[in-house]
């Protein structure tokens, strides 16, 4: 059941999973429709190191496959290949998931994303977000859940600069991950490869680095 959640998530999110060795460009209607935040994600890939599934709109499959065959610099050319030549960026992230979040204390409360005092990035979510505040009710840290599909939900976390180094983010991520698992999905966590602080949060919350990655084209 545990492995099946991840399998179902990736097959649904990308359009195919698993795949053999090498790069596999596949088409999915999801790349032409708004994602969890109402914005497009015209290219998303997940790689295990040996195998990569790159999901693009169905009408872009042939062009991206040709690009991948004749170019060693796929990522810089990917926005144009999926019809987004300017104003879009390529993310290259570490892809993590957890079936056993760390047994850290639950310090956050679930509140509506429209609650006063929350940062703008948490207001993008349409369901409750997990936050911790100080004694005066000021926001310190929070987690939102990106509900990609019924089987996989990605966690996003942020902490105000003055509250960093206190272990708030790792506790919130572990707490949110337990909720995702209770709802029957697998919690995932993506971060930029150069973001050492986010990597430490993930490790401490029970999201090991298995050598997997994810890249894609996102709004700038």
Image (cartoon, rainbow, N blue to C red):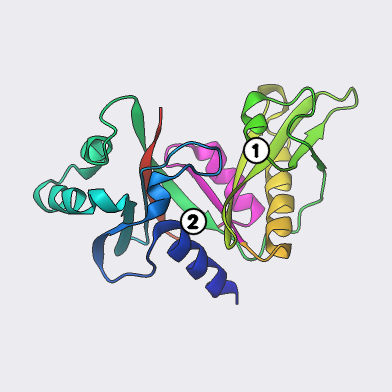
Residues tagged 2 and 1 counted as in contact (Cβ below 8 A): no
Label 2 and label 1: CA atoms lie apart by 26 Å
Magenta stretch bounds: 186-207
Q: Residue under circle 2?
A: 209
Task: Give left or right: position of 145 versus 18.
Answer: right
Residue in the image at 80% along x and 35% along y: 132
Q: Is residue 176 above or below residue 191?
A: below
- Quadrant housing residue 216: top left
- Quadrant housing residue 48: bottom left
Question: What secondary structure is found at the residue carrying circle 1?
Answer: loop
Residue in the image at 76% along x and 53% along y: 104
Q: Residue under circle 1?
A: 125
Numbered disc total? 2
Task: Give left or right: position of 169 versus 46.
Answer: right
Question: What secondary structure is found at the residue carrying circle 2?
Answer: loop
Task: Give left or right: position of 63 versus 117.
Answer: left
């Amino acid at each position: 059941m545990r492995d099946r959640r991840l399998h179902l998530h990736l097959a649904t999110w990308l359009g195919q999973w698993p795949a053999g060795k090498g790069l596999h460009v596949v088409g999915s209607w999801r790349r032409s429709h708004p994602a969890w935040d109402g914005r497009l994600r015209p290219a998303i890939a997940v790689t295990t190191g040996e195998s990569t599934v790159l999901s693009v709109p169905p009408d872009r499959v042939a062009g991206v496959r040709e690009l991948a065959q004749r170019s060693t610099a796929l990522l810089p050319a990917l926005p144009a290949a999926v019809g987004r030549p300017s104003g879009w960026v390529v993310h290259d992230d570490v892809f993590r998931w957890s079936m056993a979040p760390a047994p850290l204390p639950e310090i956050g409360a679930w509140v509506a994303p429209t609650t006063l005092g929350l940062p703008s990035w948490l207001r993008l979510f349409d369901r409750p977000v997990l936050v911790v505040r100080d004694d005066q009710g000021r926001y310190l840290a929070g987690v939102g859940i990106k509900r990609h599909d019924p089987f996989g939900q990605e966690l996003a976390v942020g902490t105000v600069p003055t509250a960093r180094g206190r272990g708030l983010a790792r506790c919130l991520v572990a707490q949110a991950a337990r909720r995702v698992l209770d709802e029957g999905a697998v919690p995932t966590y993506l971060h930029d490869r150069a973001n050492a602080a986010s990597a430490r949060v993930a490790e401490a919350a029970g999201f090991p680095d298995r050598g997997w990655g994810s890249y894609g084209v996102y709004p700038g």
